[in-house]
Amino acid sequence: MISFDNTEIAFAGKSDKDLQWSYRLFKMIGKPWLVKFGDTAQKVAFAIHLPIKGMIKKTIFKQFCGGESINDCDTKISQLGQFNIGTILDYSVEGKESDEDLDHTRDEIIATIHKSRDNNDIPFAVFKPTGICKTDLLAKANKGEDKLSEADKKAYEVVMDRVDAICSAAHEANVPVFIDAEDTWFQDAIDRMADVMMAKYNKEKAIVYNTLQMYRHDRLAFLKESHLKAQETGYILGIKLVRGAYMEKEREKAAEEGYPSPIQPNKEATDTDYNTALAYMCEHVDQIWFCAGTHNERSSQILTELMEEYKIKKGDTRVYFAQLLGMSDHISFNLAHEGYNVAKYVPYGPVKEVMPYLMRRAQENTSVAGQVGRELGLIIKEKERRKNKK
């Protein structure tokens, strides 16, 4: 049985100085009021042009991001690669609305695909649909493309051309690409988008992966429906499985607009569906290739046990584990050390542009019960181990 307690392996990629930085950062993240204040303060500081970019780059940006450009990420890609951990380059610029910006994001994602084609340490590419589509248009399309005006239909055709350009580049380069999940008021459109692309490009292997957020109570059934559709249509289903990132926002919107919440009643229900989905995909691994994106130790352990039960080899590329850069190194590094396929999401982009992503990561850490405590406890344990070794 794999253990995630070996801190020597978990922090092998960190110098004493890096470890100390991580310790200080997680101490700060452990204070919700400070995270909230920091979010407001950085917005004000950027608005009035205070010179805070350097400070951010040396702290939270350094922990959770690979750099400001693709090439800036080379050092991080190489560092992770030394420990048999792959990199998923995630262009994390959000909230753009002009066609010029949306086209630029498409081109940037295709550039990450080409980078992956030329580098074995980059096993996947990824994109967010709201990075290449105006949010109001995607929300309209979510209600049904037949309900779009003629102008909206033309605009949405351009969006689908962007999606197809990305997936076509991925197919040509033989690089799998994740389509990230988003809020429920976008997700039906994204699911349809993913279905079209999988049917087109997943005939022989999984190139396009849809993302399922298991904090939604309908996603386990959706997984099984997607599997059936893939079988009937004749393609390999690609799935990235996560717990989810928009829970509070989803509950608030459901309450405000008076519709039933799409979110599970509690964490236990989410965990149960997540682990049930892992078992289902292992059982059907010939037809479902998947990546388990999780910071949950129990789910990671369960997947290793399921792989053994279903005789799936550790290095079988149909099954991957993934975590975010700067978080849960004890899971990533120990899994990779044991020979499993592991990748880290490595966000990048201009500091100011990726701040919304960074603040979500900080807030996510404060909201997940025990997350910061576990990270800090392991860092302290490794600091003590190194101190006693000297």
Image (cartoon, rainbow, N blue to C red):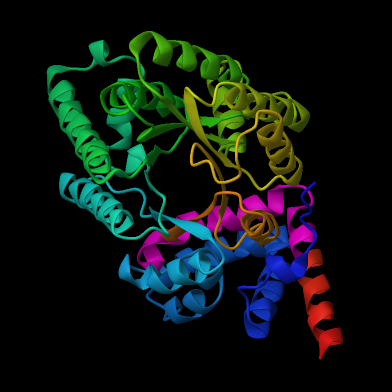
Residue 139: % across, % down: 35, 26
In the image, taking residue 341 as reference, residue 78 lies left or right, namely: left
Quadrant position of residue 26:
bottom right
Which region shows up in magenta?
348-376
Residue in view at x 81 percent, y 65 percent: 377
204 or 300, nearer to the observer: 204
Which image quadrant: the C terminus?
bottom right
Does residue 13 appear to the left or right of 50 in the view shown? right
Seen from the viewer's position, the closer of residues 249 and 307 is 307
Asked if residue 12 is positioned above or below residue 333 in the image, the reply reads below
Q: Residue at x 49, y 42 (%)?
A: 317
Judged left or right of residue 102, residue 273 is right
Q: Is residue 262 visible?
A: no
Q: Is residue 339 in sight in this rendering?
A: yes
Q: Main secondary structure of the magenta part?
A: helix
Q: Position of residue 212 (x, y in %)?
A: 52, 29
Question: Where residue 307 sits in the image (x, y, percent)?
Answer: 66, 35
In this figure, what is the number of numbered marks? 0
The residue sitting at the right extreme is 388
Residue 374: in magenta span: yes
**Is residue 326 rendered magenta in the image?**
no
Residue 203 position (above or below residue 364): above
Q: What residue lies at 19% left-to-right and 39% top-to-bottom?
A: 165
Q: Is residue 74 above or below residue 221?
A: below
Q: Residue at x 39, y 8 (%)?
A: 232
Is 384 left, or right, of 261 in this rendering?
right
Farthest residue to the bottom: give it.
390
Whole-percent x and y of residue 167?
26, 37
State which quadrant residue 161 falls in.
top left
